[in-house]
Amino acid sequence: MSDFPARISAKFFLRDGGDVDAPALIPVFHEWIRRGGVVSGLVIDVADYHHVPDGPGVMLIGHEWDRAVDFTGGRAGVLSVSKRDLDGSLSERVAAVVADALAAASALAGEPSVPWARVGLDEVEVTILDRLFAPNTPESLEAIGPEIAAALAPLNDGAGPGLEQVGDTRRPFKVRASLAGAPDLAAALEGLRASAVA
Amino acid sequence: MSSRADWRDRLNPQMEPGLAEEIDVFEAQLELRQQDRIDERVFAETRLRRGAYGQRYDNGLRHDGTGQKQLPYPAGRLTKGPETMWDAPGMLRIKLPYGGITPDQLDVIAESAEEHSDGILHITTRQDVQLHFVHLEDTVTVMRRIGAVGITTREACGNGVRNITGCPVAGVCHTEAFDVTPYADAMFRFLLGHPDCQDFGRKFKIAFSGCAGEACGLVMMHDFGAIAQVRDGVRGFSLWVGGGLGTTPQQAKLLYDWVPASDLLPVAQAVGRVFGRLGEKKNRNRARIKFLITKLGVDEFRGLVDAERAILPHDDRWTSFLPGAEAWADNPRKAPAPRDPSAELPEGYAEWARTNVQAQRQAGYSVATVALPLGDLTSEQARGLSDIARLHVGDNIRTTVEQNVVLRYVPDAELPALYQALAGIGLASAGAGTILDITACPGTDTCKLGISSSRGLAGELRTRLAAASYIGDASIEGLRIKVSGCFNSCGQHHVADIGFFGNNRKINGYSVPHFQVVLGGRWRENAGSYGMPVGAIPSKRIPEVVEKITTTFASERHEGETFQDWIARLGKKEIGVLLADLKAIPGYDEDRSFYVDWADAREYSVGDIGVGECAGEVISRTELFLTEAEGTAFDAQVALEDGDLARADDLSYRAMLQAAWALVRTEQFDASGDPDDVVREFKQRFYDTERFFDRFSGGKFARPLFVRHAEGAPSDPDAEQVRILADETQLFIDAVHQYEIRQAGATGASV
């Protein structure tokens, strides 16, 4: 067990969050499980929470990762949550989670039955789901903000973006970053993966 | 930044003595199991007693709609129980005695759900909270975090005393004898980990109610229940024993018509001792206390409890809680205040207040029900709810068996503000306690035993009913719908006006999800009577069932006639006619949606099913015979309804014989139909070989046939025993269907 948090999430918001048909994701995610290899890791099942207001929508439950079109905070977005220990520094771990969210978004972009599931690349939310490691305080932002910003740099013309801390101390540590925006998902993914490897 | 291992060091000092050590021990057991130094069966029971339960697909297999596929968990062959893969995510059940929870506790559960689960808190039909998709290694941290705020997962699962439920409006309702809260709390603490409750063959569920007339604690469907009564100024309880739902639902029997509160705990302890000593241990399917009560009779059981009570060594805890219980009083956050009738009300408030608010006994206060869709709320909503509670009601929060939350001691003047605050977190839905407020167990979503999608169906019904104009009829609005994913009744369908439990049927070689329809259960009077099964309907036609039943009731009921009375007046025959056309299923090529369950996209399956031509031929012949058996079983129910107990008994027996004969003839084309031959051949070929057994229920569904065959017709049939036999008959036929489906799968796989 490392001293870094296992649970980190990244969320890219949908470009048009107003026309979302969450149940349409159910067959998409089941098909991903059947096909295998669409997203990384072991995918196990589909959890339907679309009846919960501002909830996790429809989730693709995995062993290492959960993915969802998530509605928390009233804004729909493609969410990826790491659940098992990742390798590397905190910055590399955050980069891996952000890359996984983009990979999920990329896979959804290839699904014609969910044409609304297209993310923008100009904003991302990163959450550290480990209050012991990182309470949602200014001190945490000071301590780990630079590592998160470094992880996001490939999506921001190579420069670490400014981070806006979200929520009070009862919430998990969460930052929102405005990004310069990569030209497309493939370029964004490529930049992140190169960064993670480096 | 802190190390992840710090939770132990940080939280252990905050826990009650002993609890921290117990969790440390469990953590050590986890490590030993990982090193294969503890047997998997022993570890499974240990894990269950700590509330860590298995989930669907934890055997490493999952049907993806085209076939059963391996889920290659990284830990490989390491298991956390028989056929339960170590890495498979599981469920953690958190006990909330009588549903009581404080804002601080709610916050911690919310954090745990967020950090170790999928961010959803699920309220169960026994007032627990369940977190799903939890990795086993993470359960220890959750136990510590919730333990530090005084709640536990201990004995939330396994063969022990489960959560003790209680009326969520205890202390504030108008009909109670007195507030049962401190007594339920005392029993919870007394029995938790009690040595006399560690040797049960099965789980043991206890409920408390403040009065007999309302639903409240649902005492009549519990293993052991207490209903408050005051006699000559002394607080006490009537005690009930042996109730239960599941495959053989039974109403609890009166154990004592009154015992003083000072005798409550020792009597419970004595009951535990008798059950632990004499209850069935080997056969799980006959191990609930209801079977012991049936076997001994309640009078003999009472004698045993009396004898045990007489020799119990004294325990100060029996009475040490009494002064506190007598003095018990809730602590409202705010003083009572009447609502200002001239104040402007927020939009939607009036409807919400009509269905979700009830006046308390204490003037100036109300209870507000927070209606949770399918019992779910997010961590963020839970935090919002705890903030709202802190502001308006303090610690006066309870979960309910209808999978909602109630806020007690809301000053009437603050109800509009409370409504607006709830609306701000998406929790201001109206319709609590109405037909929209549907209860559903997890079913096939996460439960290993689920047959059909109870949550999928409940969600679909909720959506359709919310848009249906016909539910505006007052006689319909107040009906309750409850859905279970299988016959085990976790959705409590037996006590709903309209209940459903999942099963399946083989149609033209394909499995089709169905729900058995159960009508006319009585929620009031502490789950006063159970509904009548009226037949299995394809899952996709259940919304039509609801519409047809409710609208017919609204249009044809007599003045003042209740739903229960109407169902009794119609009887099984007429209801059968009413629903007959809904049993039809379009061909697979005509409409495949019937072959897919609600909220799913996979072709429906109950396992590996292949369709070979040989299997198809055999099944169609067998299905024909089984249809005859179902017809006979239906006639048995009708006879039962008509009060002809001897005929109902005989027809039930014949229906089981027909179903058994159907199976025998799959292997012996010209098999004799003589009852002795049928039972002998069925037993030898299918039961003794355990081929008929399924992995969860074993062969229990066949035993009623053997018993009835051996004992012959009763000379003086007892109504309850005949009803049980009639219900068991339907379950036996269902089990034969299941066997056929398994068999077809095996045959298909080998083709």
Image (cartoon, coloured by chain):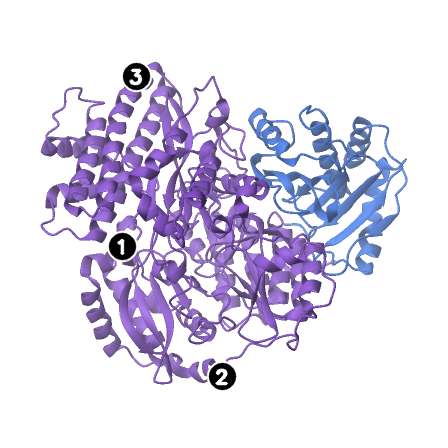
Chain colours: A blue, B purple
Both marks 1 and 2 on one chain: yes
Residue pictured at 29% horizontal, 79% vertical: B313
Q: Of tags 1 and 2, which is closer to the observer?
A: 2
Query: Residue A107 vs residue B309: left or right?
Result: right
Decide which of B631, B279 is in the foreground and name it.
B631
Both marks 3 and 2 on one chain: yes
Decide which of B146, B186 is in the foreground and name it.
B186
Which quadrant: the N terminus of chain B?
bottom right
Subunit bearing disc 3: B
Identify residue type, mark 3: Glu
On residue B281, the disc is 1
Query: Residue A165 vs residue B55: left or right?
Result: right
Residue B705 can be seen in this image = yes
Q: Position of residue B666 (x, y in %)?
A: 23, 23
Which residue is under mark 3? B617
Q: Position of residue B453 (x, y in %)?
A: 48, 38
Subunit bearing disc 1: B
Subunit bearing disc 2: B
Question: Neighbour class for label 3 at 10 Å: few (<14), some, many (≥20)?
Answer: few
Pointer 3 with pointer 2, Cβ within 8 A: no
Q: Position of residue B530 (x, y in %)?
A: 34, 52
Which residue is under mark 2? B327
How far apart are the alpha carbons under marks 3 and 1? 41 Å
Identify residue type, mark 1: Lys
